[in-house]
Amino acid sequence: EGIVFSYGDADHDYDVEDGVAFPPIPPASPESRLPQLVYSKNSLKLWHMQDRRFKRPLADLRLNFVCDGMNDALKQACMDLFCKLCADALAETCYLASVCELGSSLYSNDTGFSIRVNGFDDKVMLLAKEVLDVVMSFRGRDGHTCLPSTIKDSRFDACLEVLRRNYSNSGMDASSFVTGLRLLCLKPSTKSSFSKLKALEGISSDKFVECMNQVLQKISVEAYYHGNVCREDADKAAQMISEALTIHHRGLPKKKMPSKLIIKAKEAVDHHLITSPTVDPTDNNTSVEVYFQIGKDDLTNRVLVDLLEHVLDEPFYNELRTKEQFGYEVSCGARWTFGVLGMSFKVTTSCKTADEASARVDRFLGEFRAQLESMSDESFMEHLVSLAKEKLEMFDSMEDECGSYWSEICEGRFDFEGHRKEVQCLKTITKESLLAAYDDWLHPICHKGKPKKRRRVVFHVIGKGTIGRPTVDDPSEIGEHVDGLVRDFHNSVKGETWGKITF
């Protein structure tokens, strides 16, 4: 059972193995073999797809809850605490379920929280109901200031202490900290761990419950049920979720849904530099990330960015890491942030300064253009074919397949065959178009030989004893220093964003 693909004659199949002939593109999947929206009512949407590929007795239910007014540090911190309290209350149940190979997770995000329940298909909904009963026990309690009966009063302080420690230890690794700093600057809706830690000062269970009453008053739910489950099972799941939302459910109108906005970097010759000391005052490592912002998501540009990553990754690593030993972590990659394309180059080092690392990245980009221009047609075709094969790879597991489709649903793209479309577009890309994109987005010199305007932001996280490390008298004030850097960056671009991006 399943789609039967016909890829052509045997000679063509042998040619594909040469690495210079473009791989055959499978036919489009019928709608019945892709996720379908089977329920949409009262701010609840459920997507469903029955597995016909892996044929295992498993199911995966994923839910994303978008809450009203998640726009300040206190509400985001309370959401983090809410997830910890619910996970703590469910610990015994989830442990017993794990013995039966049923898994579950509950985690917060900028706009609300998400739930995942997976395992044997005949038991998934039983565990999902247990999880939803605890989560939804916080709803419909206007006027109440005490915790619901599902949460033990004694666990509030314990979970709060764990959360505070998590916030305090956030960003201890220089490499992850520099990436987090980039996201804080690009995503104005994201609040730092420091600001959330500060917002929790003096919080009581009464104030927490009051905050959660506001946040959970209006919610919108997007769900996806995938695996060895038929349409009838999906209808039952929708009914169960709808009932779990309680009779007090008030949906969040589409117009009130939070917009995922991304800051628009300035197009200028000089880059915007954001410099912070490492959170750990004893850390000798310095991490640098050079980010190039490209623009709104577009099929052709997305493919070009992926191809640039494929072409640049090995030479960039070979030059800076293997030959020059510039740093122990050297990488480059495409970035897709809420529908805005970009590309970043990262170097983490303990033997070079941050200025040397960022200057070396720009020098590499200047020198590599000649290699790109002189690249043979055969080498270019090898990159095209290799990238196309990567995009056409089959899913390794049902979990991978479900995760790919779920990300499309969460991001609002609903392009379930995006990789296939990208390969079709990749087939039209020429070396000239790739070189033009490189010149437009990355190359530091314009065709007139003068410095070029680019949307470039450079992030420095500087370790102990390294030249250029900002002086912060008290290590506990680093978080406040970082928040100030983010505010200054937003002010420098006057808060300009790419606007609401639709697909």
Image: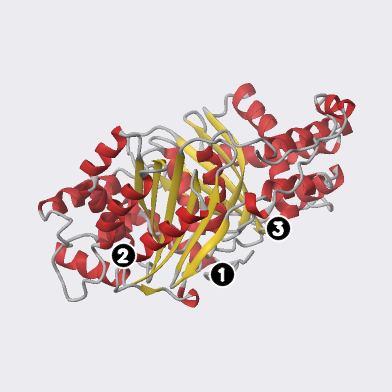
Q: In the rendered view, would you say 414 is above or below 20?
A: below
Q: In the rendered view, would you say 270 is above or below 214?
A: above
User: Residue 414 sits in which quadrant?
Assistant: bottom right
Q: Which structural element holds mark 3? A: loop
Query: Looking at the image, is mark 1 or mark 3 nearer the viewer?
Result: 3
* Residue 366 in the image, given as x and y percentages of width and height: 74, 41
Q: CB of mark 1 within 8 Å of CB of mark 2?
A: no
Q: Nearer the viewer, residue 47 or 468?
A: 47
Going 33% across and 39% down the picture, which residue do you hit?
280
* Residue neighbourhood size for the residue with mark 1, other residues' Cα within 10 Å, grouped as few (<14), some (14–19), many (≥20): some
Residue 444 can be seen in this image: no
Going 61% across and 54% down the picture, which residue do you hit?
271
Task: Tell me the colour scheme of the image.
Answer: secondary structure
- Extreme-left residue of the structure: 154
Quadrant containing the C terminus is bottom right
* Residue neighbourhood size for the residue with mark 2, other residues' Cα within 10 Å, grouped as few (<14), some (14–19), many (≥20): many
Give the residue number, with chain letter if any, for mark 3.
298
Q: Which structural element holds mark 1? A: loop
Tell me the number on the disc at residue 330. Answer: none
Give the residue type that dot 3 points to.
Asp
Residue 180 can be seen in this image: yes
Give the residue number, with chain letter if any, for mark 2.
75
N-terminal label among 1 and 2 = 2
* Residue 84 in the image, given as x and y percentages of width and height: 26, 50
Q: Nearer the viewer, residue 423 or 271?
A: 423
